[in-house]
Amino acid sequence: MKIKIRKIIISTILLSLFVLPVMVQAGMIGSLKNTAKPAGFEVDDTDDKTLAELVGVIIGTFLALLGVLFISLMIYGGIMWMTDAGNNERAQKAKDIIRSALIGLVLTVSSYGIWAFIFEKLLGGTG
């Protein structure tokens, strides 16, 4: 019973880590436009995005969420390793989690770099 509650709590926390930043960012964009207009700045009121820009935003958001996932796995593996209490199997499992998270983080950062290059240089995007 305790394990199920623990899994639900951890899942809720991780889900909120993934969803809340996207919701906050979406809310801030409208506020910034409303603030910029009275201050005398030019604001592009058209929210029309090209297909390339829309795909770029989706890919960027997905890669950012993957980065958060891998950092969470690093923290989980580190805590697991610190609390292994001499249990070699648990320490090895923690090392495997950290190693996998590092590989995943390197792949995510590399793919983000490739995406940014393609989107900025080849498609002329702004995001």
Image (spheres, helix red, strand yellow):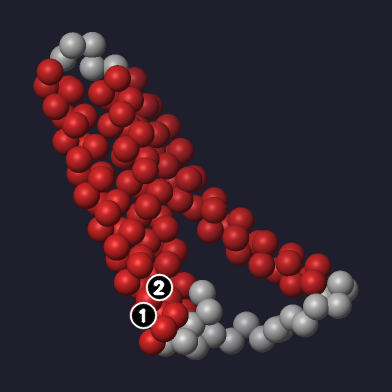
Q: Which residue is mark 1?
A: 118
Where residue 92 appears, as percent x and y from the top left, is 14, 27
In the displayed structure, would residue 44 be above or below residue 1? below
* Point 44% across, 46% down: residue: 15
Residue 1, can we see it?
no
Is 97 on the left or on the right of 113, as rendered?
A: left
Residue 39, can we see it?
yes
SS under mark 2: helix
Which residue is more in the foreground, 127 or 113? 113
Amino acid type at image mark 2: Ala
* Point 31% across, 29% down: residue: 78
In the displayed structure, would residue 88 be above or below residue 36? above
Is 79 on the left or on the right of 22, as rendered?
A: left
SS under mark 1: helix
Where residue 4 appears, as percent x and y from the top left, is 32, 28
Among the 4 quarters of the image, the one containing residue 83: top left
* Point 81% across, 68% down: residue: 35
Where residue 11 appears, as percent x and y from the top left, is 39, 39
Q: CA distance from mark 1 to mark 2?
A: 6 Å
Marker disc for residue 52? none
In the displayed structure, would residue 82 be above or below residue 9? above
Where residue 120 appears, as percent x and y from the top left, is 44, 80
- Work out which quarter of the rendered image holds the N terminus and state it: top left
Which residue is more in the foreground, 117 or 26? 117
Amino acid type at image mark 1: Ile
Q: Which residue is mark 2?
A: 116
Crowd band around label 1 with a 10 angstrom C-alpha radius: few (<14), some (14–19), many (20+): some
